[in-house]
Image (spheres, rainbow, N blue to C red):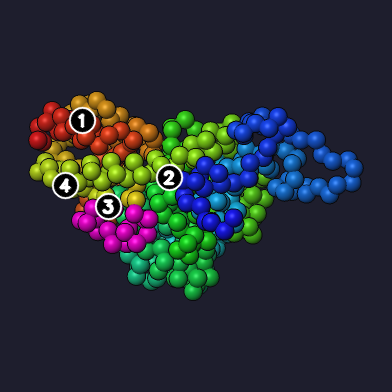
Amino acid sequence: MNHILNLQTTAVHGGARKDDVFGAINEPIYMTSNYRIPTDGTPVDWSGIHSNIYCRNRNPNQMVLQDKLCALTGAQDCAVFASGVAALAAVFTTFLNSGDHAIVSEVCYSATNLLFREYLPKKYGIEVTLLDTTDTDAVRAAVRPNTKLIHVETPGNPTTGISDLDAIAAIAQASGALLSVDATFAGPVSIFPLRHGAALEIHSMTKYINGHGDSLGGCVLGNTDLIDRLKELAMVNYGGILSPFNAWLVARGLVTAPLRMKQHSAVALAVAQYLETCPGVRFVWYPGLESHPQHDRAARLMNGQYSGMISFDIKGDEKAHQKFLDSLHLVTHAVSLGDVESLIVYYDKNSDKLPHYSAIYQEGFFRFSVGLEDAEDVIADLKQAMKACGVL
Ligand code: PLP
């Protein structure tokens, strides 16, 4: 068939189904730690990443999930891990050696920040420049002869800054570095980093890919050569693999990712637009708002869907922030994001996790993961909480 399938159809049908002997339409869960190895002379790949030997090397549930992710993103290959952090650490430790230099988004998930600020330089002698990657000139100026990796998080966690992937990919290519992009905040159906020149696309599957808040997972997408290197080192020898059961859960969630992302994006846009009208709101950052500093870039990169992540703050002291959180009924104060239900987390101004280069960070603020509820209900909850804490 010459017809190219759309995203939601690909999410349903994409990836090879590994039919079982009973003809089950849904993938069975292969709860086995090892496999019978051929004794009839059939060649065996003892690395185990291309033969069934042992569950740490590969298993059918991982493979089905990997295939579906490749179908959605157009990647040649994919490796899945036990968590987003396991996927990130796999990339950093596979592709960086001591003496190498990495350029990294300063606004990024806290574990990425800590790995690059502390562990990779101190334990492994890796040179690191953390900077604002939404500033393309700063990225260009930071390149050194030994730069081997440019790692960009976009939209950046927690403030949703958008980096110019095409321009940074050109910088990476000219300097012989790999560009890896953590696109967790957008999921694999809103931003397509590989189409914009990235060598590696990374997601915490815990978020929009699984989407139901019941499993952790991480994935890395790229060409077969890079992904084989990741599997050989990080899956087989570091061992942070995704269990068959969690791979099955995440693959089930992935089926509805395009559908969910439409609703997340529509509700978040309505919520962000509402927040912008509130005099008691100090700032709102949402890539879909024209007021977002990189809105034009987001419009170019985000496939018309700006995801469910908003950062905003109310005008009030610490007590007012606490009261606001305490007054929410529908929205839950919790970490993580990309779930069916709305989650909000407060970044206290004293949090050591915040990069303090931006004025926004001088005070605390909220990171809001808008769920799949109806916009009207989410807005009503925010409104009554703002009234309760006295900013409306
Ligand atoms: N990358 C980003 C952008 C994240 O927001 C997170 C977690 O919040 C991670 C990676 C880590 O993912 P996990 O919790 O699955 O290890």
The stretch in magenta equals 287-304
Q: Is residue 193 above or below residue 115?
A: below
| SS class, disc 3 | loop
Question: CB atoms at circles 4 and 3 under 8 Å apart?
Answer: no
Mark 1 and mark 2: span between their CA atoms?
Answer: 26 Å
Q: Which mark is residue 288?
A: 3
CB at disc 1 and ligand 1 closer than 8 Å: no
CB at disc 2 and ligand 1 closer than 8 Å: no
Quadrant of the rendered image containing residue 19: top right
Mark 2 — residue?
A: 258
Mark 4 and mark 2: span between their CA atoms?
Answer: 27 Å
Q: As shown in the figure, which amino acid type bears the numbered disc 2?
A: Pro
Question: Is 111 a magenta residue?
Answer: no
Task: Give the residue displayed 34% in from the left and 47% down from the top.
Answer: 307
Residue 176 falls left or right of residue 325? right
Looking at marks 1 and 4 on the same chain, the residue that comes earlier in the sequence is marked by 4
Q: As shown in the figure, which amino acid type bears the numbered disc 3?
A: Gly
Task: Give the residue displayed 34% in from the left and 35% down from the top.
Answer: 372
Q: Which tag is nearer the camera, tag 1 or tag 2?
A: 2
Looking at marks 2 and 3 on the same chain, the residue that comes earlier in the sequence is marked by 2
